[in-house]
Amino acid sequence: MIRVRFAPSPTGPLHIGGVRTALYNYFFAKKQGGKLILRIEDTDQTRFVEGAENYIQESLEWSGIHFDEGPKQGGEFGPYRQSERKNLYRQYADQLINDGYAYYAFDTAEELQKMRETEEAAGHKFQYDSKHRKNLKNSLRLSKDEVQDKLDAGKPYTIRLLFPEDEEIVFTDVIRGEVKVHSSNMDDKVIFKSDGMPTYHLANIVDDHLMEITHVIRGEEWLPSAPLHVLLYRYLGWDAPEFAHLPLLLKPDGKGKLSKRDGDRLGFPVFPMEWTDPKTGEISSGYKESGYFPEAFVNMLAFLGWNPGDEREIMSMDQMTEAFSLDRCSKSGARFDADKAKWFNHEYLQQYPMDKLVTAFKELLKKETIEEVCDDYIEKVIKAIKDRANFVQDLINSGLYFFKHPESYEEKAVKKHWRENSASHIGLIADEFEKCEGWNSENLEDIVKTQIEKHEMAGGKIFNGIRLLMVGASSGPHLFDILEILGKEESIIRLRNGIERLRSLNQ
């Protein structure tokens, strides 16, 4: 059975790149009839951030990405937090040492830093590799007795993987094809830390093996670590899973990986949900709080690095699952486009169930202290204005005049459209509106056009003048739709009151 996992670290909020990785794993597992596992990789306790794990799980749930196994769901391969599995890893580190594939390193951080400075001063790059390891304080250079004495004395140490001196490490990536890395370009990574915890590299491989993971689908940033992981599988005598490294999410200009700072600078979220830093109190915006539908969010995200092979863009979770394949994932990075993200939400807003839009709209009205408005009226308003909206909040921002008299009139619009004769001309139209029996958009338009022709009025100024009195600005949907929705009594009140308020400007 296909088994894939998403394995975030609780070191802060979940970046949308991480959500995309989880999403692609979800698509792959569901299409293959497999299982999706959530594993929390919290071996690095120095970087642990309070609340991050809950944030990660809530963000994934909001995004519609549901797991078959994990800390909440449980499962036969648990526990699903690495900190609860730490008793599992030491035996594999010892196995690697006993088999000659790893060694103890007793160098202190200060000693390594001094060596690094010395090498760099001589114009050389320093890394703990086949060139330098035999001159450092480790079990490759020290005698067995010296090593045992240090162990018995409780001297701090790490365990490093022994990279071969001269070997081409080759593996196949599902997206990128054959990948070759020469061992001379790799350093002997620490696989077990001095605090008694495994590093990501060892814990990751052990857990993937014990959880029977068949495919590792992760971000491109892990590609440099893949040769190390391939060696660990070989040294431990296990079959490696298939690897697929996804393209990076790039800044809008394509120059580098998308970061939180880009969102702060350019004004769009890079996290699925709002995040409050527990140490600084700094708040980072999220897609949920910014008004995005989760369906639109994941649809947008799915297309950053993948396409279905046809012209479709608006696709449901089930449709994307059915169409998904790793061979349609891009090798090159995908530029993030904030305007395109809004476009996706706009498209979902247009097809969103009206009853849910009405409910959401009523909640926004309550914040404006407007209550007891009938659903039918709200529905008419939404239908009139939603084609220009990207978010539900836009509906209230652009349509509040349907529920409140204009408190003021846009100065620019008044200056442009209101003339000395506007009050008298629109007053004549208000008189005709009083006589109107069939209050609908078509009849009202006929009345106004008839009056314009009869009294030789300036049509553009009249239309915009009436709109100004209804809305308070020169924006909005079709003028006569506004009048029909507001109704006869309310429309005439706004005309009469507005005429009096603006008449004074010309006196």
Image (tube, grey):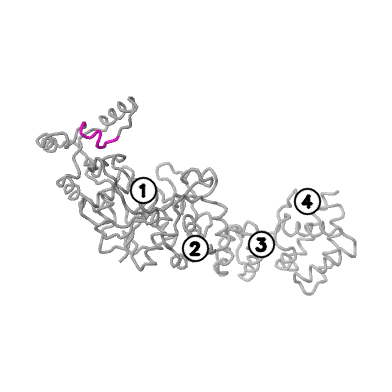
Q: Nearer the viewer, mark 4 or mark 3?
A: 4
Q: How many marks?
A: 4
| Residue tagged 1 | 223
* Mark found first going from the N terminus, 4 or 1: 1
Residue drawn at point x = 78 percent, y = 64 percent = 492
Of the residues shown, which amino acid type is indicated by label 4? Val
Label 1's element? helix
Q: Nearer the viewer, mark 1 or mark 2?
A: 2
Q: Quadrant of the N terminus?
A: bottom left
Q: Are marks 3 and 1 in contact (CB under 8 Å)?
A: no
Give the magenta part as a residue range.
Answer: 127-135
Q: Position of residue 239 (x, y in %)?
A: 25, 57
Q: Is residue 79 left or right of residue 472?
A: left
* Mark found first going from the N terminus, 4 or 3: 3
Residue 55 visible somewhere in the drawing: no
| Residue tagged 2 | 309
Q: CA distance from mark 4 to mark 3?
A: 22 Å
| Residue tagged 4 | 414
Of the residues shown, which amino acid type is indicated by label 2? Gly
Q: CA distance from mark 3 to mark 1?
A: 56 Å
Instruction: Kindly give the residue lying farthest to the left in the view shown.
Output: 145
| Residue tagged 3 | 403
Q: CA distance from mark 2 to mark 3?
A: 46 Å
Of the residues shown, which amino acid type is indicated by label 3? Phe
Q: Position of residue 55 (x, y in %)?
A: 40, 53
Quick check: is 69 in the magenta stretch? no
* Mark found first going from the N terminus, 4 or 2: 2
